[in-house]
Amino acid sequence: MVTIIQAVLLGILQGATEFIPVSSSGHLVLIPWLLGWESPGLTLTVAVHAGTALAVLLYFWRDWLDMAQGALNWLRTRDSGTPAFRLLLLILLGSLPAAVVGGLFEDFFASVFERPLIAALMLMVTAAILIVGERLGGLTRQVGDLTWADSLFIGFAQALAIFPGVSRSGATIAAGRLRDMKRADAARFSFLLATPVIVGAGLLQLVKLIGAGVGSSETLMLLAGFVAALLTGYLVIRWLLHFLRTRSTLVFAVYCVLASAFSLAIFVIRGG
């Protein structure tokens, strides 16, 4: 059984790597494997994902409130010209590729790719994506400049994160950079675009959990993981948006290369 300390550490891990472009799915595969922990299980997975979902909703609550008001205004007046309502449409459009790919292929990719070796190799892919985004992208556009084509392009990049080890935020930030977005703006749109995906994934996992029941002995462990993911996720979003105003994502690419190389070395030493 996962201990409370392990639940807190996994919550911190999920809260940090969900938003830092180094792949939360890859780390949730690799860290328990490296440390010899048992699988977190569905209940704890639901708890830590719920924590990060609430973190992104709380951090961007003003944006979502503005978008909700824009949608209500459209229902009353059919005026679709407000920036907030247009942003909502961009997010919904950009969410479609991940929703379709995830709905059709998630179970297949989870069974095939949630292995330490594959997760380690996919971290190299994340590093390559970040490097390409930095080397080829411009720094001239903001969120308000996005077009429908931009949103779809970034949305297809988000769908790549179905591979454990490929960072969702890394893929979408790099895609935004390839559309010449400023780093902080690319990250902001990445996090807003992630909200439907993170919340939707959490709800799907919750549906799977209903009926299984949660024992009273697990309650404190689940609460610890949830709170750790919530607090860490909120602080990491705030930190990363500030960091990317003046710095590039190349440091995260370097980290992914080192983490991948270390994991591959351990894999070879252990013999699989």
Image (cartoon, rainbow, N blue to C red):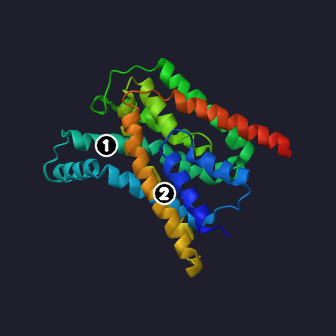
Instruction: Identify residue type, mark 1.
Output: Leu
Q: Give the left or right position of residue 269, taking residue 194 as reference.
A: right
The residue nearer to you, when weighing 89 against 12, is 12
* Residue occupying the far right of the picture: 271
Using the image, tell me which numbered label, if any, was put on residue 229: 2
Instruction: Return the x and y of residue 17 as percentages of the image width and height.
Output: 53, 46
Q: Which residue is mark 1?
A: 89
Residue at point 84%, 46% (across, down): 270
The quadrant of the picture occupied by the N terminus is: bottom right
Amino acid tagged 2: Ala
* Residue situated furthest left in the rendering: 77
Residue 96 in the image, given as x and y percentages of width and height: 44, 44
Residue located 56% across and 67% down the image: 208
The structure residue drawn at horizontal position 68% and vertical position 61%, both measured from the top left corner, is 39
Place of residue 35 in the rendered image (x, y in percent of width and height, measured from the top left): 71, 54
**Alpha carbon separation for disc pair 1 and 2:** 28 Å
Q: Are marks 1 and 2 in contact (CB under 8 Å)?
A: no
Above/below status of 139 relative to 121 = above
Q: Quadrant of residue 255?
A: top right
Residue 269 in view in this figure: yes
